Image (cartoon, rainbow, N blue to C red):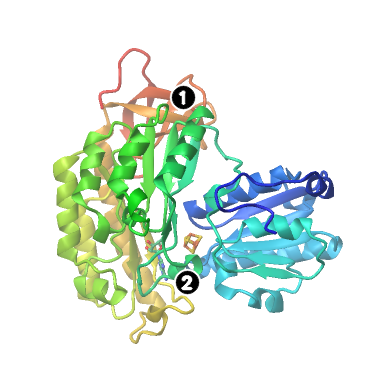
Amino acid sequence: MAFFSIDGERPVSGPAATLQAAMKRYHVTTFGCQMNAHDSERMKGMLESIGYREATRRADADLILFNTCSIRENADNRFLAHLGEAKRLKSERPDRVVGVGGCWAQSVKEEVFDRFPFVDVAFGPGQVHRLAEFLTSDSLTAQGYFEFEGFTGRLPSKREREFQGWVQISVGCNCVCSYCIVPSTRGREVSRPPGELIEEIERLAADGVREVTLLGQNVNSYGRDLPSPSRITFAQLLAMVDGVDGIDRIRYTSPHPKDMREDVIRAHAELSALCEHIHLPLQSGSSAVLKRMRRTYTRERYLERVALIREHVPDCALTTDIIVGFPGETEADFEQTLSAAEEIGYDGAFTFVFSPRRGTSAATLPDQISHRVKVERMQRLVEVVQRRGRERAERFVGRTIDVLIEGPSRTDPSRLRGRSRHNKVVNFVGLGSPGELVHVRINAATSQTLSGEESLLAGATD
Ligand code: 5AD
Ligand code: SF4
């Protein structure tokens, strides 16, 4: 029997299991996106509920875990470098357990045991609960678990920050973007029922969470697969979350431009907790490249969505993901991407060099772009992105804005660090504590961060 129920019931952690794990310590290293950050919090919650405790250093752990990502080749490489250390630690103490979860594990499946025989257990993103079963069984043979069985969002959680919570609203992705490995690692899209999500958010609010981030590979197609009595749209879900007492901020990631409907855009103007920030992955500004990427929108359609956002929520922060050097990308195609970035004026952008991924159709397309051209295009793109980001950030100078304090500033511990509703990092002089919402008057801006002083007198001007 599965140790953790994934059908929404509470986990069954018997005394035998707790005894078996008595005082054992785990260490988790997380790679990849926010969904992986969320899944790691659930792994930790599940391990704690069967008696494990967290070790701050990998070398002190009895259970060494990696939650992996496979989105680009350098994500693979970073993880493989860490795995070398796990091998050494395991050879020093063979009773240590090494586990590999997440998207890389899912993409190689059983092959992990051939390539890395010191790995004891491997599991995909839909099989996190099986880890507890493995740890509490008497099995000494390596085990791999790769079928999607349930949402990690139903496992117990150990949150990184008391006042911020991830909420997994769906898993998987039905898109067929030709460069992307995710549909093969996270499977078809499945939404969690709205009632269950609202209950979870109410529990989070009661536990001190003020900001929730709704997570899915394609959040705004949420609900389409639900049975009719509970079928709601993403915009309706946002309104329900906005109604939960105690939740001051709602974020979500990532939406797909093809599903960015007017109701979701309007929700940003109408719902008081929904933040003025939309991350809308562009990928390319060339319709020809978008077509080969199988993104199912054109440059024009994307620009129309941006115009609609600016019409309803003029001050909304817009961020994006862009890939340079997709196979067959001509200089003219790339200039379309540059001009889109120039015209739209993103508040920030994640820029990536195309990386061929196993099993994706783009990996074998003709006309792969040379590394030299990719790097040169990337430099030109980063120049535009940073310059426009800086210009956009200037609009906050002189304004007093709401900041949710996260902790001390990373560069100057005498100052505080937090985030604005627009998702800007704000470093400031102030007295508040983590989890508090304060007003900060902004006096300087760079493309990445804002800085200012806590304002005790005035309310936020926005
Ligand atoms: N190569 C480069 N970037 C990629 N991304 C996804 N797959 C690839 C790839 N094969 C980028 C996309 C996506 C972000 C999470 O990672 O921009 O939005
Ligand atoms: Fe990496 Fe994508 Fe998996 Fe997230 S969903 S961990 S970005 S491969």
Q: CA distance from mark 1 to mark 2?
A: 40 Å
Q: Is residue 198 above or below residue 353?
A: above
Instruction: Give the foreground label among 1 and 2.
Output: 2
Is residue 212 in view from this perspective? yes
Quadrant in which the N terminus is drawn: bottom right
> Can you tell me whether the CB of the residue at mark 2 lies under 8 Å from the nearest atom of ligand 2?
no
Q: Which residue is mark 1?
A: 436
Quadrant in which the C terminus is drawn: top left
Q: Is residue 186 above or below residue 330?
A: above
Is residue 449 in view from this perspective? no
> Can you tell me whether the CB of the residue at mark 1 lies under 8 Å from the nearest atom of ligand 2?
no
Residue placed furthest toward the top: 457
> Residue 2 sits in which quadrant?
bottom right
Q: Which residue is mark 2?
A: 184
Q: Amino acid at mark 1?
A: Glu
At 83% from the left and 62% from the top, the residue drawn is 138
Q: Amino acid at mark 2?
A: Ser
Q: Residues within 10 Å of mark 2 (few under 14, many from 20)?
A: some
Left or right: 192 with respect to 151?
left
Secondary structure of the residue carrying tag 1 is loop
Q: Is residue 36 above or below residue 160?
A: below
Left or right: 50 with respect to 363?
right
Q: Nearer the viewer, residue 293 or 145?
A: 145
> How far from the left and from the top, in percent, is residue 362?
38, 79
At 38% from the left and 34% from the top, the residue drawn is 249
